[in-house]
Image (spheres, rainbow, N blue to C red):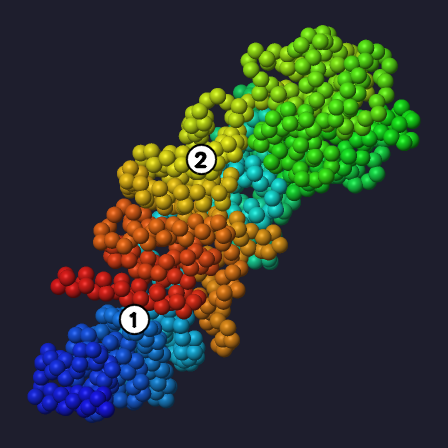
């Protein structure tokens, strides 16, 4: 009853105002006096009353429209209520009224906003209803035009021109486009009506306004720009990919192709590389490392470059080209054109390996159908011309031709794996001996690791070693079979240990198996990364078997008679440490003579080479726990193991090859310069490695190996703290950028652990520690924020990798289409319309999720203030870079973790010039209603800030 009375009073005031021609301010005063303060004028339908009286006559009442406009500006009515009421006007034949309404909308278009939560919830529907109403209005005009033979009256033309101007203003208004974008996600039924109305208009006319309608209805998030902190121009020199490839080959050389591809595509996204630039940087990175790699690691890199890089490029090409266009890649050709400009790298590579590196790689790419013969001939001849100029300098090649050396391994590798699958034949030992020469076994393993079949090779050798660890039954009666079985056990053991020594225990496959060699590595050998007392190994031995071993190898007539022993070959290996320990104790107590010790060692190593390796492993670890005055005798024993035997033994068939590799293994065991054994402070060791990186501005492979060891010794926190300090201490932006890129690559040694400690420990300490806050200045803030975003995206990529599922890509915010959408022949996909199941397809690790939640809580504490501090700037840069670099649906998993009001408080502190409506829309998960509600609230907040800023200039 009260509402009706109030409405009656409003009508009285309105009639009196019209009769007496009140100015707007007087009308506003009287209306406020007539209405209670506790309710807005919307509750009494002030808008309806004004518009109902406005259109009683032939034309609109301009005075009443001015009252309505004043009511909007004085907050008597809301914009959603006014717009919604206008869209209910359906007399499309009254052109003067329509012109007045469109003029009115033109005048208020720039001020459309909200001030309360209820208004925000209705604004989206109101603006989308306005779009629908404008489309219907144009549809009526176009139908009239067809009925009148494309001739419009002056009123109709004016009306169409006014609508065109209004639509153009809406399209140019990023705020309204953002509201429309949210509205089509919120009200799907109304959006479908807009789409259907547009199809009718699109078929009736090609007027300019139709293009504006298309932009309003089918606008995507990518069409609403944001101010980007990171420029779109790509960097001229890449410092990221070479270190990344070094780490990737070090820890992940045998991974599936799609694992490498997913990571490389992630780097391409954040670095904005073209595909040709990405191809060129991948190949250049491999060439740089291959030129400088030391020891036998060039075999790993040669295998990776010639075997795996072509497959990686092929899959990258398939990701970006339709299937029918996938037989040839222009991007690969462009990449090689870029590579041809890297003359110093190619010259060094070609002289080092005495080959045409470009031609070698192109031949492998041809097998993947990425280049053809014409391209190969053109580029190879061009490179050969440059090589011919180098020949006059007579530069000796230091390594064999990489293509012949690596590619020649394929047949032996296939033959070895095939032989390991079949019953062992007598000629199998000869095959193993050929692989012992020049340590070709490790080259075989390198190629197998790159091909992803290393586990087949290693498990086959372990199984072979297991089968021959015991000589019993009929085999023990035949001297020929005894020798054969012993030699196979010995050779397979040496090969396995040599491979394990070069690739590292942590990268050695099948170490958790039940075979003898795997058990011996775990329990009988001391892993430097998991140190244990050598005496604990001694305690595992059987005293009775140890006594038998001492008697066996201490026999004075051993060399002439070769007495039999009841122990298995594997049991001898298990008990050698205790035998050596007892011999050492006896030698220390002068119970036995040095010559007796030498005889025991000579007899042991002349029996089988693997015994020498087992002995050297234990002795070298035992030396580490002794005092300086106790080192002499154990060292003499190790040196004895490295000496040559008599010529008679060395001339035995296949023994010299095995003994040569055994010597190499023992020398490396004895002379192992592990960082863990260094007496220098770890900070000094890190600085030495870092100096090497800074000098070159790329990551040498041996330095990557040392950094991995530092990570294992000191942990992620220590390593990340030192890496972040290097960024903070840099003086120039260019230096900070490339140090940050190298740091990001090094983090891939343990991307999850390093990311979590960066977010949870290092970053939070920087935000809370006053002394550390002195470092938080520009441009360090932006560089650190970029590193955090890079690492988060890389960690999410590692969680999302699934070899059985192809990784979806999206350079724009293309999400799944709306459910049960009527087909109209147009692209009517609604971005953000994702179910929880879709979001769950991109999981976030629980540890990373916890780290982000803790970080966002700290962010929330920092923005609850009234000042713009470096902390606030960092938080803004963090979120800006996050939404700038990651545009796929995977970012939803992060956005859902942001606390309520964090972003709203942030918007109030950050300067308006740095903000944009596109930034706000990207900060929320718009696939859910809560995300859209928060987004419209922040859009209105930013719009109100803009309006206040504009009004202050008047």
Considering depth in this image, is 545 or 803 the residue closer to the camera?
Answer: 545
Crowd band around label 2 with a 10 angstrom C-alpha radius: few (<14), some (14–19), many (20+) = many
Q: Which residue lies at the image location 42% right of the left edge and 40% below the top edge?
A: 741
Q: With respect to residue 593, does 396 lie above or below?
A: below
Q: x and y percent of residue 16 in the render?
A: 11, 89
Q: With respect to residue 295, does 92 lie above or below?
A: below
Res 163 visible: yes
Which label was assigned to residue 159?
none
Q: x and y percent of residue 499 in the render?
A: 66, 31
Q: Which residue is mark 1?
A: 117
The answer to whether mark 2 and mark 1 are in CB contact below 8 A is no
Image-based side of 319 in relation to 204, left or right = right
- Where disc 2 sits, the SS reads helix
Q: Earlier in the sequence, mark 2 or mark 1?
A: 1
Q: Which residue is mark 2?
A: 719
Q: Quadrant of residue 91?
A: bottom left
Q: Which residue lies at the image location 40% right of the left edge and 72% below the top edge?
A: 186
Question: In what quadrant of the picture does the N terminus appear?
Answer: bottom left
């Amino acid at each position: 009853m009260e509402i009706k009375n109030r409405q009656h009073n409003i009508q009285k005031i309105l009639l009196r105002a019209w009769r007496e021609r009140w100015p707007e301010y007087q009308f506003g005063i009287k209306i406020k006096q007539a209405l209670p303060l506790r309710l807005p004028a919307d509750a009494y339908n002030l808008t309806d009353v004004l518009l109902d009286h406005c259109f009683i006559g032939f034309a609109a009442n301009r005075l009443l429209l001015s009252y309505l406009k004043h009511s909007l500006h004085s907050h008597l009515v809301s914009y959603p209520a006014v717009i919604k009421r206008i869209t209910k006007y359906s007399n499309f034949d009254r052109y003067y009224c329509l012109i007045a309404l469109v003029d009115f909308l033109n005048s208020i278009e720039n001020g459309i906003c909200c001030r309360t939560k209820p208004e925000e919830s209705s604004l989206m529907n109101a603006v989308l209803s306005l779009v629908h109403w404008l489309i219907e209005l144009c549809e009526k005009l176009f139908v009239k035009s067809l009925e009148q033979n494309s001739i419009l009256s002056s009123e109709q033309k004016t009306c169409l021109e006014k609508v065109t101007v209004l639509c153009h203003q809406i399209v140019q208004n990023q705020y309204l486009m953002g509201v429309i974008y949210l509205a089509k996600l919120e009200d799907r039924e109304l959006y479908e009506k807009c789409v259907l109305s547009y199809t009718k208009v699109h078929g009736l006319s090609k007027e300019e306004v139709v293009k504006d309608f298309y932009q309003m209805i089918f606008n995507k998030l990518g069409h609403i720009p944001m101010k980007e902190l990171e420029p779109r121009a790509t960097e001229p020199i890449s410092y990221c990919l070479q270190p990344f490839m070094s780490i990737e080959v070090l820890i992940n050389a045998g991974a599936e192709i799609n694992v490498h591809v997913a990571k490389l595509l992630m780097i391409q996204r954040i670095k904005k590389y073209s595909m040709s630039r990405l191809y060129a940087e991948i190949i250049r990175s491999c060439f740089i490392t291959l030129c400088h790699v030391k020891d036998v690691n060039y075999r790993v890199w040669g295998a990776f470059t010639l075997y795996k890089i072509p497959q990686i490029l092929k899959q990258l090409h398939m990701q970006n080209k339709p299937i029918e266009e996938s037989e040839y890649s222009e991007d690969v050709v462009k990449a090689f054109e870029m590579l041809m400009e890297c003359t110093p790298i190619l010259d060094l590579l070609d002289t080092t390996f005495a080959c045409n590196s470009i031609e070698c790689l192109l031949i492998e790419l041809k097998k993947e159908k990425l280049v053809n013969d014409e391209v190969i001939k053109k580029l190879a001849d061009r490179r050969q011309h440059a090589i011919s100029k180098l020949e006059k300098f007579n530069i000796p090649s230091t390594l064999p031709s990489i293509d012949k050396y690596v590619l020649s391994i394929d047949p032996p590798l296939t033959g070895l794996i095939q032989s390991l699958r079949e019953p062992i034949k007598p000629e199998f030992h000869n095959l193993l001996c050929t692989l012992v020469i020049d340590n070709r076994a490790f080259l075989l393993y390198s190629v197998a690791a790159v091909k992803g079949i290393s586990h087949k090779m290693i498990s086959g050798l372990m199984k072979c070693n297991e089968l021959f660890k015991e000589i019993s039954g009929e085999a023990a009666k035949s001297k020929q079979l005894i020798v054969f079985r012993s030699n196979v056990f010995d050779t397979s053991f040496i090969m396995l240990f040599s491979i394990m020594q070069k690739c590292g225990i942590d990268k050695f496959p099948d170490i958790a198996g039940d075979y003898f060699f795997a058990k011996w590595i775990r329990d009988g050998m001391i892993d430097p990364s998991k140190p244990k007392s050598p005496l604990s190994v001694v305690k595992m031995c059987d005293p009775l078997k140890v006594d038998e071993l001492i008697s066996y190898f201490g026999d004075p007539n051993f060399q002439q008679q070769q007495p039999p022993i009841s122990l298995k070959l594997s049991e001898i290996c298990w008990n050698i440490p205790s035998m050596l320990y007892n011999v050492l104790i006896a030698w220390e107590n002068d119970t036995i003579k040095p010559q007796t010790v030498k005889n025991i060692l000579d007899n042991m190593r002349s029996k089988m080479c693997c015994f020498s390796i087992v002995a050297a492993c234990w002795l070298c670890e035992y030396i580490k726990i002794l005092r300086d005055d106790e080192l002499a005798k154990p060292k003499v024993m190790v040196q004895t193991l490295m000496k040559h035997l008599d010529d008679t033994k060395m001339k035995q068939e296949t023994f010299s090859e095995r003994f040569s590799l055994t010597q190499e293994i023992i020398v490396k065991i004895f002379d192992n310069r592990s960082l863990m054994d260094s007496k220098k402070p770890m900070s000094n060791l890190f600085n030495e490695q870092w100096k090497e990186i800074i000098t070159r501005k790329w990551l040498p492979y041996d330095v990557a190996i040392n950094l991995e060891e530092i990570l294992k010794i000191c942990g992620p926190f220590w390593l990340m703290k030192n890496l972040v300090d290097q960024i903070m201490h840099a003086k120039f932006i260019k230096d900070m950028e490339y140090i940050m890129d190298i740091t990001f690559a090094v983090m891939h040694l343990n991307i999850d652990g390093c990311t979590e400690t960066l977010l949870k420990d290092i970053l939070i300490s920087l935000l809370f520690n006053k002394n550390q806050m002195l470092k938080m200045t520009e441009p360090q803030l932006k560089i650190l924020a970029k590193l955090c975003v890079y690492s988060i995206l890389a960690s999410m990529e590692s969680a999302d990798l699934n070899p059985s599922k192809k990784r979806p890509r999206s350079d724009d915010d293309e999400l799944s289409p709306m459910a049960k959408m009527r087909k109209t022949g147009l692209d009517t996909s609604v971005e953000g319309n994702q179910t929880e199941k879709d979001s769950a397809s991109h999981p976030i690790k629980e540890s990373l999720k916890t780290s982000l939640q803790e970080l966002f809580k700290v962010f929330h504490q920092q923005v609850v203030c009234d000042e713009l501090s470096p902390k606030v700037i960092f938080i803004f840069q963090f979120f800006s870079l996050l939404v700038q670099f990651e545009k796929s649906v995977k970012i939803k998993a992060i956005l859902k973790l942001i606390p309520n009001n964090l972003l709203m408080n942030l918007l109030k502190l950050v300067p308006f010039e740095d903000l944009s409506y596109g930034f706000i829309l990207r900060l929320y998960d718009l696939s859910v209603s809560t995300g859209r509600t928060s987004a419209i609230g922040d859009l209105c907040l930013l719009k109100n800030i803009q309006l206040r800023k504009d009004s202050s200039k008047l």
